[in-house]
Structures are given as structure tokens and as C-alpha cells.
Image (cartoon, helix red, strand yellow):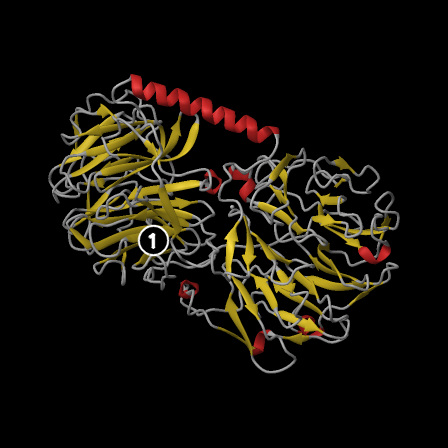
Amino acid sequence: MIPSRRRTGGRLASTRRLRIVATTALLLASLATPGSARAPDAMPYRWTNVTVGAGGYAPNIVFSAVERGLVYLRTDMGGAYRWDDKNARWVPLQDGNAVPSYMGIESIAPDPRDPDVVYMAAGVGASQPAAILRSSDRGRSWRITPVPFAMGGNEDGRGLGERLAIDPNATQRLFFGSRHDGLWRSDDAGATWAKVARFPVAGLGRPGSHRTHGGVAFVVVDDTSGRAGRPSRRVWAGVADPGATHLYRSDDAGETWVAVTGPALLAAKGVIDPRGVLWVGYASGLGPSGIATGAVWRYDPDGTGRDVTPAAWRDTGAEGAFLGVAVSAISPGTVAVSTVDRYKHRDSLWISRDDGRSWDDVGPRSRRDVSATPFLLHEGKGADFGHWISGLAIDPFDPDHVAYTTGATVYATRALRRSGAVDWMPWTRGIEQTAIITLASPTGGAPLISGFGDLAGFVHDDLDRSPRPTFVDPYMSNTNTIDYAGMAPNVIVRSGSLYLDRPRDASMGRSEDGGRTWTEITVPPMGNPPRREDMNGDWPITVSADGTTMVVATPVPQVSRDAGRHWSIVAGLPGKIRAVADKRDPRIFYAVDVLHGRVLVSRDAAASFSVVAGRGLPADLKPVGRQGREAQSGLVADPDRTGTLWLLAGERLFRSVDGGASFTLANGELRVELFGLGRNAMFAIGTLAGVRGAWRSVDQGRSWARIDDDAHRWGGRYRVISGDPRREGRVYIGTDGRGLFYGDPVAVR
């Protein structure tokens, strides 16, 4: 999706004092120095999510046991949400947080006695900060406890759990099952933590790069083994590390532990029913991918277990496993499980109402209405039951109300009955959990065209409605670059990449109707022996102001003037360098040769490039913008003025008004990370006076006004920013996990 700006106690006072000091110093400097780097006051903006409707992986959904209609959802890099039953929408709980790592939620636990209290374990990966977040107002504000054990909210195994457990009989006592460092306990409501020394699994330690551990995958406290005011005696813990034993039980409140018999599989998901019966989903791998097989077991309070895996699942090949496990709080013996990685027969949900003796496969009688979120049709195969199903919950107040999470959405039904069709609806209003790679706001047509990770991208005719998919022919899971013709904005080009296990014919496309329909673009094989260099999505495609010329930054750059039917080699342009079209003059293209520290210009529609002076630029241009195929271009042409360029070198922004012959410094005191142009303004992500956020300048970068605020930080996970060339003040920000936002200035009365 993180420390809130609404902290209590000494930290809040300290934070406020620092902010007051910094603001006062900046204000004095701005009054004393002409052309200051920031306006004295921040500019108020209204921020709204561009509607898609979820879109990413939500590892679990958890109902409150004490208040009807109170539900929490955790995501792997977009933070957590709470269902607002009165307003019928999900409320993001971490938009005010500024620590990127805390947007990956490892576990979430609503208090089983007090509906106002909720806890979260936050940390995106093993090398990033981790903390336990505590709230007494349903997630409106948080107290933060940094912890020494690493988490993996966006690593393999994020669908395991829940790792965080509260003792219903002594709610100040919490357990947390860590990935790498064994089992931990807090006796003061999460304020301090100590490792449970006698737990048999100490942990494998922090892993090397690109690896993770399952560790203690879940902790379950049996409230039937105690009474109010005293710790429950029975605690269960499942382990997802290699070893002979994967399930342990304590009968003395977690002081000592015994091994419990089970299958030779990882204990992935565990839940307990009102009788003290434990239900466990087992898997051969951590998931959410790469799981071959699994099982479902039922354990009586004394530890006696039996295999209750659905027989029909075994009859169809025993493919995949069970990462979703849920029980009814008011209908004893009712349990539901969901499959994961069942590719051949497709994932499904199974329900038993007789303690696992028989199972009903709900999948064949399920129907899905995705009219409110038509983006789910983006792969062209219709809305299926879903993939990566690890979150599954039965409403504790209504056993017919069931919800499950997938890699792209959250589904719910109000009528999971014994027979007849089951209608599932996306339960996503208010959830926007996507990674935005790139975007463009053209000079005509739709106000916004986006490039997403996993979902390809969309033409957003209406920013407040989920878009229909149009990025087909070719279909690419990730859109890495988008460009439009400045004088003919109906011409759009894009390049992208596809999952490695999917066949592809092209990784670039051209549209002549504003992105509604597309034609595949391919370039000739090159190299010795010749091969298709355009198939991996690494190379950007650019289109001229009139839409007739396209340039592709392949290792041998190519240019076409007939919509991609014929290509020729670009002279004077080194390979793998993105060309940028002048938005007003179709003959002109620009490029930055980072390796040799040169600015290049073409005045013959990309037939050839030559060096221009580039006076005023630093000698070393290697840190020009972010790098990689998903990076926003560090060189941008003004959509309204021929020959006007903006170039980001390191954290400094430069401007040229003579086609690259000379540049002047144009970022004031703002340290710039990302930037984009709008109507009579420019926008940037950067840091000024110690404050990192979104900024606007209306005087060519001499001064800047902050346009975000402490309630809109989105974890600081910024990917792309651009203004709107047609609407004064409008800005678009793409995040890495909290979706796409548009902001408009608020009129001050």
C-alpha cells in the first residue's frame, strides 16, 4: 500500500515541531530571496482515485467478530482497507503514510472484543523496514512499533496466515509468526515484543537476495481454552519452512509446545471454529504461484487430526492447494476452502456443512457480474472464478455472506446456499490497488491513457468509471511506454511486455482512434544471426507530431513512415536511446546520448540525428531520469511550444527554449525525482526543505508549491506524474500500489 501523521504522544509533538521549524525557515527564505524555490503556502488540491476497481492482489480479507459489517482487507503493496458499511465503500487506511515498505501488509487482526481496535503487521520485504501498527479508531490513525523481525508483505508466501493473532480472553496479549525469526509475543497490546524462546522453530534467519522463507505461517488462539481476563491455554502455530513437523500446539498459553501430526506439506492457513476445532490448509509451496499439491485437515482440541480434503479435488488430479480456509461462527461444522494454482481445472471454492465429510464444489454453479468493473475482461477470456485465491471469509453474522480475494479483485456473494446458482459481485468500491508504469494525457481525445503493470492499461474517457479493456492486438500484461502525436492526438503508440509463459507476436502497437483499436507493430530482425529484438518490451516507441513517423529505440534504431509496414535504420542515433518527438513540428525529434554526454536532434523526421551544443548541461549526463524499460522519460517536449525541452539530470531539472542548443537550470531548490508538464504549469515529485511529495510550479520552475498534503502520501510509492495539457491545474500521479490519482486545485474562498 506506515507511520501516520496522526501519531499520538511525544512523536507527534516532535514531528509537529520539526515541521513548524522547517516551514518557518522556508517562509523566511522565500521572503528574503527573489525567485524562491517554493511559494510561502502550500496549494490546496483535491485528490481522487481514477476508478478501476481493485486490480491487484489482496492476500486476505478478515471480518470483525464483534460488529456486523466491519471488515478489513490487506493488500501486498497498496496498504489496508476497512469496509464502511454505512457508505458502502472501502476506506483506505494508509494514504497518510510516507514509508514505502509499510504498504505491504503481512497480516491484519481486528480485536475480537473491541470493534475500534485493529492491528497490522507491515513490511514489504526482508530488506525493508517492518513494524506493528496499532489503532484504537478503526485505522483512522496508527501508533507505530518498529520491530527487529523482517516481514514480506509483497514476497512469496503473502497469502499464508494470519500471522498476527490476538488472545480473545486477554486482548493485550498478541502473537506474531515471523518469516525468518520464529514466534514472537507481546503482552502490552503490541507496544513491545519478545521472542518466544521455547518455540521449537527458531527461524532460518534473513534470506539472501530474491529469496524468502515461510516461517511461522499462522498463529491461532483457542478462546475455548480459557476465560475472560486470563490468557487462553491453547495456541496453535503452523510452519511453512522445510522440516519434519509443520504444526505445533501449546496447552500452557505458549510456554511449551508439542508437535502435531499432519501431512508432509507446509501448514499454510489455519482458522479455528467456535468449538475449538482447528482447520488447516496445507500446500507444497509458499505460493501464490508454484504450488503443486495440498490438503485440508481438521483437528480436534486434543490434537487428533484427520484428512478432510475434498475427494473430487483428488479425483481431478490433486492439482494446486488450499490457501483459503474459512469457518462459520454461527453454524458449527460449516467450513469453506478455496484452491490456488489449479490451472488445468481452474480454481474454485468448496464448502462443507458436515465437518468435512462431504464437499460441494461451488465453482460450476457460480456466476459473475463484472459490469461495474469491466476491466476484468482485459485478457479477452471473460471473468473467470479468479486466480491466486488466498483470502476467504464467511461473515460471522451471516453464513450465506462469503467473500474471497484474487490476484485482481475481491468477490462476494450474499447467497451461498445449498443449491442453485451463486451470484458473485466484485466487492471493490473504493479499492484501487494497482501499479502504474506510465501514462499520457494527450492534447485531444480521452483525458488520460494509462499503462499498468499486469492489467496492460486503459483509455480513460471517464475518470470515475471502471474502463473497458481496449489494449488488445497486441495484448501485453505490462505497458511500459506510451506516446501520442501532439498535432494528431488520435494517433497513439505503446510498447510493453508479456508474462514469460505466454506466447506473443508483438510488443508494440499503434492506434489511430485514440487507443480504442490497435494494430500490431513489428520491426525487422537484426543482428548476426538476425533475431527479433522488439519482442521483449525493452524498447520505447515514439511518434511524430503529425502521427506519420514512428521511431523504435531497438539496438539498431528503426524509423517507419507508413504505419510500420516498412522500416529503415536511423542515422546518427545510437542504439537503445529513446527518441522524443517535438509535439508541434513533425520534422523534429530529440534524444540524449547519456554515454557520451550529448544532446541529439533530428530535423528530417528521424532520418538522421546530429549533435547540438547543449550548453549549460552538466558534463555527466548518466543520471538522466530513472533508468530501465519502465522508467518515465527524463527528456520531455513541451506540448505547446516547438523547441522547448525539459531534461532531468540527477535531481536537477533543465529547460531549453532553442531546441537543445542551450539549457538553464529550472528546479530552484527542489530535488526532483519525476516531473511532467501541464497547461501553463509543471509538476514534480521531489523534496524541498525536507518534505518529499508532489509539487507545482507556474513560473518555469523558479518556485514551487506543495500540492499534496499529510493525508495524501500513498506510501511515497510514486511511479509517474504528468499534467493535463487541456485543463488548468489538473495533474495525474501514478503510484506503485495505490493506483492512479488525479488532482485538481481547490478554490480558496
> In the image, 239: left or right of 139?
right
Relative vertical location of residue 117 with respect to residue 656 in this rendering, above or below:
below
Q: Quadrant of residue 422?
A: bottom right
Q: Nearer the viewer, residue 705 or 530?
A: 705
Q: Quadrant of residue 641?
A: top left
- The quarter of the picture where the C terminus appears is top left
Which secondary structure, mark 1?
Answer: loop
Q: Quadrant of residue 638?
A: top left
Q: Nearer the viewer, residue 300 or 512?
A: 300
List x then y, in percent, for residue 5: 52, 36
Count the labels in the image: 1
What residue is drawn where x is 31% and y is 38%?
Answer: 633
Which residue is under mark 1? 507
Name, please, the residue furthest toward the front: 749
> In the image, 45: left or right of 243?
left
Give the residue type at disc 1.
Ser
